[in-house]
Amino acid sequence: MEVIEPATPEEFEKYYRLRYQTLRAPWGQPEGSERVEDDDTAIHAMLVDEAGEAVGVCRLHLNTPQEGQLRFMGIRQDKQGLQLGNKLMQYLEARAKALGASSLMLQARDNAVNFYRRNGYEVQEPTYMLFGTIQHYRMTKQLS
């Protein structure tokens, strides 16, 4: 397994397909809802297996020069629970630091809070309900 930054149309197709399958399809959201306006200015990371298939996705966007935001973390269902998300977190945290960020924030779904806690993030506050059913929490981490 390795983390790459998708660069070709084929890689982006795999990236967005997995983002949709893990983060939108289970809640009946339409295709295309996995994309947002600032995707073109974000750093995208994709964990791929030995066959080049997407196993995990996440993206980094700088909110300010000092604060990065992680969004759209998703691991393929058959690979969840294997600590593969940690690889994406480590990769994007290193990228954020290299860009000069001193902290990261994210909006964690209720069922992902403990994953982010294990990766050093702290809950700041509950924020919003996605699709009217998924509670999110603002979490932050200082980069050292």
Image (cartoon, helix red, strand yellow):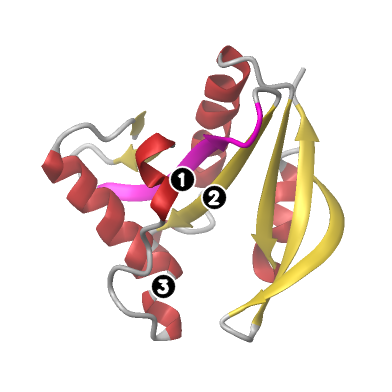
Q: Nearer the viewer, residue 29 or 22?
A: 29
**For the residue carrying disc 2, how many other residues have a C-alpha within 10 Å: few (<14), some (14-19), or many (20+)?**
some
- Residue that numbered label 3 is attached to: 24
In the image, is residue 133 above or below residue 82?
Answer: below
Residue 62 location (% of width, % of height): 58, 32
Q: Amino acid at mark 3?
A: Arg
Q: Position of residue 138 (x, y in %)?
A: 76, 55
Residue type at mark 2: give it.
Arg
Q: Residue 78, percent across and down?
A: 38, 63
Look at 39% across and 81% down and name the residue there: 29
Q: Residue at horizontal 71%, vertical 24%?
A: 66
Label pair 1/2, CB-CB below 8 angstroms: yes
Q: Nearer the viewer, mark 1 or mark 2?
A: 2
In this rendering, the answer to whether 81 lies above or below 102 is below
Q: Nearer the viewer, residue 7 or 65?
A: 65
For mark 2, what is the residue?
71
Q: CA distance from mark 1 to mark 2?
A: 6 Å
**Magenta span:** 54-64
Residue that carries the numbered disc 1 in the rendered image: 58
Work out whether mark 2 precedes mark 3 in sequence or the reverse, and give the earlier one: 3
